[in-house]
Image: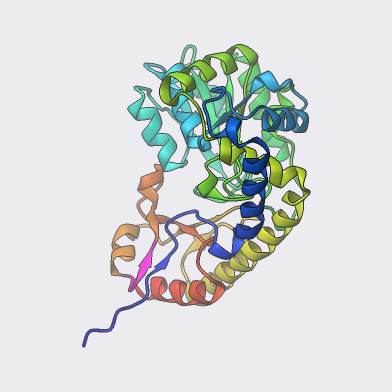
């Protein structure tokens, strides 16, 4: 009889099931349905649930009219790409989020890649490339706990990148879903704040509450917010108001901060387990050491084919570097889903396949 090996997934940035506040969300959903069900179960504004837009506006110090809620932040990314990047140059980091690459390309954009190092975007490369590219649509960046590398752009780099972009009149599109998943170190200012709240900011509640609720949000210049709201209405008529109202109830009940502390503790244990397992089982390789977020970027010796290593690994999944525009000898490891015990076993299996 064949023995089935349990598959350990390092492939997707998904929170472990125990991170999800199921009972609390059920209570919040029931409360908003009983209180406001006839409204949130019908059609509504394409910009989203008004009380949650107002709350996010307070968080970011902007008028609620600049806040657009979407069915996950990726949905909003698609609307923005179709509006701003079609037939245009949209600068990205190298490597970057694989789904961002796919959306931009499918929207008809050209995606020049800017070099990054351990401190984030390399300012000299950004400046040189922008000088050669007239009127790009935007610069897309994940400055904090980047997907796929886990790196964080340093404070000095943030100021340089903003200064260069503003001097060349290039909009910044900041994707920031991970910054609250911080285990250590001090928070850094968002690029949004460094631009005087004039750039595009995107985040979601997928990592801090639940991905299945599909509640993302954008803070946009007011005219662009109106355009994206119109595009959203034309695309899906209304967002999922029940989910957005449930998130609002969860926050106003005072559940968000305690839940975030709990989630960070659970995911930190997994980050620590992965870093410890890499130290124990890998030699001749290098990897990032993120202070938060979901990902470690592992670089095997040059000449090693990471995809072949993953294919050989017994019961382990991960994503090879080229999926993100990265090197063939690199791979992304997500530590957010597997248990610490599974992470130890999975890293050992992966090392044995090198």
Q: Position of residue 350 (x, y in %)?
A: 40, 70
Residue 315's image quarter?
A: bottom left
The answer to whether residue 349 is above or below residue 318 is below
The answer to whether residue 311 is above or below residue 93 is below
Q: Residue at x 48, y 71 (%)?
A: 283
Q: Work out whether residue 100 can be spotted.
A: yes
The answer to whether residue 92 is above or below residue 273 is above
Specify start and end residues of the magenta stretch as a single range.
313-317
Q: Residue at x 33, y 74 (%)?
A: 314
Q: Main secondary structure of the magenta part?
A: loop
The answer to whether residue 298 is above or below residue 343 is above
Q: Single out the residue that lies furthest toward the left.
A: 1
Q: Position of residue 137 (x, y in %)?
A: 49, 18
Magenta stretch encompasses residue 14: no
Name the side, left or right, on which 106 lies relative to 177.
left
Q: Work out whether residue 175 can be spotted.
A: no
Q: Single out the residue that lies furthest toward the bottom.
A: 1
Name the side, left or right, on which 333 lies relative to 226.
left
Q: How many marks?
A: 0
Q: Quadrant of the N terminus?
A: bottom left
Residue 189's image quarter?
A: top right
Q: Position of residue 116 (x, y in %)?
A: 53, 40
């Amino acid at each position: 009889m064949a023995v089935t090996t349990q598959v350990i997934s390092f492939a997707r940035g998904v929170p472990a099931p125990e991170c999800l506040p199921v009972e609390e969300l059920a209570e919040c959903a029931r409360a908003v349905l009983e209180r406001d069900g006839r409204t949130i179960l019908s059609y509504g504004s394409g910009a989203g649930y008004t009380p949650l837009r107002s709350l996010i506006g307070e968080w970011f110090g902007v008028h609620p009219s600049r806040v657009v809620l979407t069915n996950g932040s990726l949905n909003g990314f698609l609307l923005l790409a179709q509006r701003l990047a079609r037939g245009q140059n949209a600068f990205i980091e190298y490597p970057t989020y694989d789904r961002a690459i796919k959306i931009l390309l499918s929207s008809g954009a050209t995606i020049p890649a800017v070099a990054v190092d351990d401190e984030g975007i390399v300012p000299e490369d950004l400046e040189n490339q922008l000088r050669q590219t007239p009127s790009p649509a935007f610069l897309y960046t994940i400055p904090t706990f980047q997907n796929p590398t886990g790196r964080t752009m340093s404070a000095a780099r943030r100021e340089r990148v903003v200064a260069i972009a503003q001097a060349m009149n290039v909009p910044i599109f900041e994707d920031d879903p991970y910054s609250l998943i911080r285990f250590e170190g001090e928070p850094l200012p968002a690029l949004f704040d460094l631009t005087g709240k004039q750039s595009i900011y995107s985040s979601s509640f997928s990592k801090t509450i639940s991905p299945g609720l599909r509640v993302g949000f954008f803070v946009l210049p007011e005219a662009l917010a109106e355009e994206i709201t119109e595009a959203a209405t034309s695309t899906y008529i209304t967002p999922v108001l029940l989910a957005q109202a449930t998130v609002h109830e969860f926050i106003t009940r005072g559940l968000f901060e305690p839940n975030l502390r709990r989630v960070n503790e659970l995911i930190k244990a997994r980050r620590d387990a992965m870093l410890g397992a890499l130290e124990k089982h890998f030699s001749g390789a290098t990897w990032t050491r993120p202070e938060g977020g979901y990902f470690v970027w592992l670089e095997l010796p040059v000449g090693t084919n990471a995809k072949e290593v993953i294919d050989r690994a017994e019961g382990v999944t991960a994503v090879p570097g080229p999926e993100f525009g990265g090197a063939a000898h690199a791979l992304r490891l997500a530590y957010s889903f597997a248990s610490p015990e599974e992470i130890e076993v999975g890293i050992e299996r992966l090392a044995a396949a090198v």
